[in-house]
Image (spheres, helix red, strand yellow):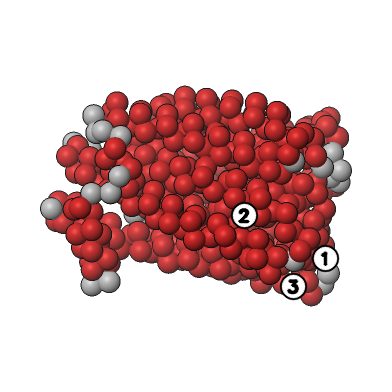
Amino acid sequence: MAQKLELHRFARDSLYNLIRQGWSIVFALAISILLARGLGKEARGQYTLIILLPELLLTFTSLGIAPATIYFVGHGDFSITRVIKNNTFLSITLSIVSSTIGIILIFIASDHLFPNVSRWYLLLSLLSIPISLLLTSLISIFQGLQDFKSFNLIGMASQLLFLVLILIMVWWQNGQLLGALTAYITTNFLTLMLVLGLLWVRYHPSIDLSQILDQRYFRHLFSYGALAHLANIFSFLNYRIDNLILNTLAGSGQVGIYSVAVGMGERFWIPATAISSVLLPRIASLEGQEDTRKLITPIMSRLVFWLSLAMAIIIWPLISWIISLLYSTEFQEAAIPFRLLLPGIVFLNTTKILSNDIAGRGKPHINVYQSAIALSFNIVANIILIPKLGASGAALSSTISYSILAILTIFAYRRITNIPWQELIFLQRVDVLRMKSIVTRAFS
């Protein structure tokens, strides 16, 4: 059984991701604390909104390049050199379109979409678009190759660099918002240089343009990527649209409070993120091996659900003290939104596992439908609850949305595989032996 499931390889790749996620906890928390204490509640909320603009634009205009690259590289359909050239050309083209749309939005609608945020800062944030789009489309090659060692080392180096730049530009030079935004853009640029260097050393892509505008590549990329793109749009909006609604209805101070709660809560995505990043290319590579697919995903779903639940139970009574200690009493009210987010995060972790299995089977359209439904519930709930509860209303809306998405995803996965939903949630006796085997192989 262990050989059939490739537990050694799965454990090794998941371990690489868990190491990176552990690193991420420490550095992301340190960065969040430095930004909160260095900027204060109002400016911290403004920073969240400023970088939200390029993230929104990239979400809408990236056309699913990254998930499609992971899927097709995992299948081995195209040479790495061809992927690098065409992804680079497409990323540059789309970044021009995205930046142009951003400039138009800023001059026409920034007062309505981003009240209390400087137009100059919003324009400056657009510099991150070509950098981030190219970075995302190229780093996904490592994930598609299941080279998680390189993939995670790049991510770890990026966070270390961001921490150093925040210390220099926000604290040492007292750069406030400008320093924080400069650190964000500079980190992405230097990380892109690292990725380009690794790809150049390993694959020596030629500079000639012979393989650019490859119609077959683009046809395959967009046939999968368009659906994955829609799913990503709905998922991103489900995670971030509450910030826009919260800013409009309650002000940037409440966004600052909510950003701390979300930042803490996102650390609980670590088990699901570490495993689902391995699962998508692995499921894609197991074409024709349905029995193996049906064994791996339910095991991971059960493991992630109960691990997330245990983490939530432990942190629940401690969060007020932790937030006051790390962020100061100015952000203490973030404890209530955090607690309201926890149930949704537990369910969302299971969703991440199952949705990546569905995408790995070449069925991203299913994730599109489910994410759209969950987003609709999120928007309505935010509009109803935020005027009454502020940041807590945004957190409760997210939990409602995440729970609905989890239910929809579980039943969609059940329809595809005929696996009872109970097997995705409730632990089995054999899980103990399997987990013991995974841990043993991971450290062997």
- Residue 101 appears at what percent x and percent y? 72, 33
Find the residue positioned furthest to the front: 317
Residue shown at 73%/54% (left/top)? 333
Check disc 3 and report the residue beneath it: 168
Front of the two marks 3 and 2: 2
Q: Which mark is residue 251?
A: none
Where is mark 1, residue-wise? 175
- Binning the other alpha carbons within 10 Å of mark 2 as few (below 14), some (14 to 19) or many (20 upward) gives some
Question: Which element type, helix, strand or loop, lies under badge 1?
Answer: loop
Asked which quadrant contains residue 15, the reply is bottom left
Q: Amino acid at mark 2?
A: Gly
- Residue 263 circle label: 2
Task: Note whether residue 227 is visible.
Answer: no
When the figure is inspected, residue 179 is found, relative to residue 223, above or below; the finding is below
Three-letter code, disc 1: Gly
- Comparing 65 with 229, the one in front is 229
**In the drawing, does residue 123 fall left or right of residue 70?**
right
